[in-house]
Image (cartoon, rainbow, N blue to C red):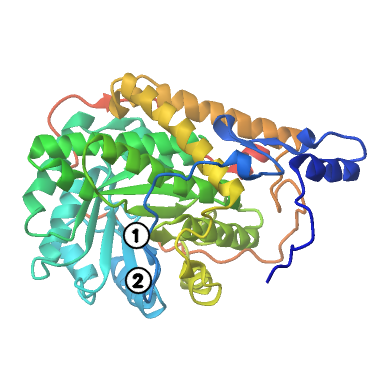
Amino acid sequence: MPLAEGFASASRAQWLALVERTLKGAGADTLVSDGADGLRLRPLYTAEDATAPLAFAPAARGGEAPWDIREAIDCPAPAEARSRIAQALAGGACSLLVRIDPTGEAGVAAGSAEALATLLEDVSLEETAVALDAGFLGVHAAGWLAAAAKASPSARLAFHLDPLSAFAETGASPGPIEAHLIAGAGLATQFAQTHPAARFCLASGRVVHEAGGGEAWELAVMAAAAVAWARALVHAGLSMQAAFSRVTLCLAADGDVLVTLAKFRAARVLWARITGACGVEATASLEARTSSRMLAGGDPWTNLVRLTAAGFAAAAGGADVVVVGAFTDALGRATPFARRLARNTQLILMEEAHIGAAIDPAGGAWAFEALSADLAGRAWEAFRTIEAAGGLVEALRGGLIARQAEAGRAAIAARLASGETRIVGVTHFRHALDRIPDVETTPVEPVPAPSPRLPGPDSHCPALTPIRLEALAT
């Protein structure tokens, strides 16, 4: 319908003049906000701001599930964790992210192949993808998962080997960090033929985000981790094509819909540029995990809105897999009720809001095109800086990444102090709750497990300690 027929096109100057009338004489530039890593958010975008289409392959959409709804399993008691797995799959989850921690503090208290096989006994590995989160124990846990799937050669396993994030967060590795990369690459080569549908390595930038860093450096660390894994895999015997095809990218999704959506699109731009430079064609596999730093403990009910916004932004931005955390994660381990809300958040976005009905729904929107291009450009320069420093391991050792995270954290603290950034339930609209939501408190005894230590001296780097915005604001 020619609804605009007969009306003259409005110029940018005319739009800005109307805006400035409502600002009572103030300039439109007062509405520009400064984001992390030099990113600027403007109140108005036009075709001149995004003239060249971005070069990337968007995420595939369609089918019964446009993206993979993945549920984190971190209940420490193995028997209870097994029950939670059944609840998750019956309640709409498509796949599982099993967190392994033999101490029971941050995941399932499992320390052997037998324990993991028992945990997954009722899971059809041919139909349900299983991913791991095991830190420095990743190579051992990957062996346990491979053993559990030995009768399922086409199982869609995600070993998610990621010693680099563990090294960055803790500031130390048990043995040389390079040895952990070599061990992971060797295992990937060993299982490449027996598990052709598996993905082995996780290239994540989340540790930067959770420590307060900005989006460009989070993307850059993700890209540098992907290149580090590709080098290790090729050195271990895989082809360049096979190496990139077995790497999964991972980013944090937070409640800033505009920037988060642009960040996930920018990740695909970086991937296309890196794989193109290496002469390979490999489709990006992009996993989103909702931000922990954005969650509030004083009024956790407000987290439901943050998690919904983050889940929307990740799905609309083209994530292949989305893990939505529980609204009580700032308080402790989630109950079945909190996990159900997390699942249903994604199900409503998928089944009722139809977020996955279009491929790259933000494509062509001037604001998203401009922000995606800006983020991709800034991230590429940061990635080049990391590579010039000798790669991600050396950039971590030398403190380059830690300094960037510290700068981001200081900028966030300044915006909170000035009132430019507000947190509902923390800095504004605080509300005394009659009842704090329940969390799981059952203690679990640690179980025996193999040592993650590898021969050689430990590696060290300035730790990227996770933060919470709530703590910076109070």
Residue linked to disc 2: 94
**Residue located at (16% from left, 50% from top):** 140
Helix, strand or loop for disc 2: loop
**Residue located at (42% from left, 60% from top):** 322
User: From what the image shows, is residue 163 above or below residue 283?
Assistant: above
Q: Is residue 156 rendered to the left or right of residue 377?
A: left
Quadrant (top left, top right, bottom left, bottom right) of the C terminus:
top right
* Mark toward the start of the polypeptide (1 vs 2): 2
Report the mark closest to the observer, 1 or 2: 2
**Residue located at (26% from left, 26% from top):** 459
Rate crowding at label 2 as few (under 14), some (14 to 19) or many (20 or more) other CA atoms within 10 Å.
Answer: many
Residue 285: image location, x then y, percent: 32, 53
Determine the residue located farthest toward the right in the rendered image: 24
Query: Residue 143, labelled with which disc?
Result: none
Residue 13: image location, x then y, percent: 79, 39
Helix, strand or loop for disc 1: loop
Quadrant (top left, top right, bottom left, bottom right) of the N terminus:
bottom right
Q: Is residue 122 rendered to the left or right of residue 370?
A: left
User: Front-most of 142 and 257?
Assistant: 257
Q: Is residue 118 rendered to the left or right of residue 340?
A: left
What residue type is disc 1 on? Answer: Val
* Residue 126 seen: yes
**Residue located at (13% from left, 37% from top):** 234
Residue linked to disc 1: 444
* Residue 215 seen: no
Q: CA distance from mark 1 to mark 2?
A: 28 Å
What residue type is disc 2 on? Answer: Cys
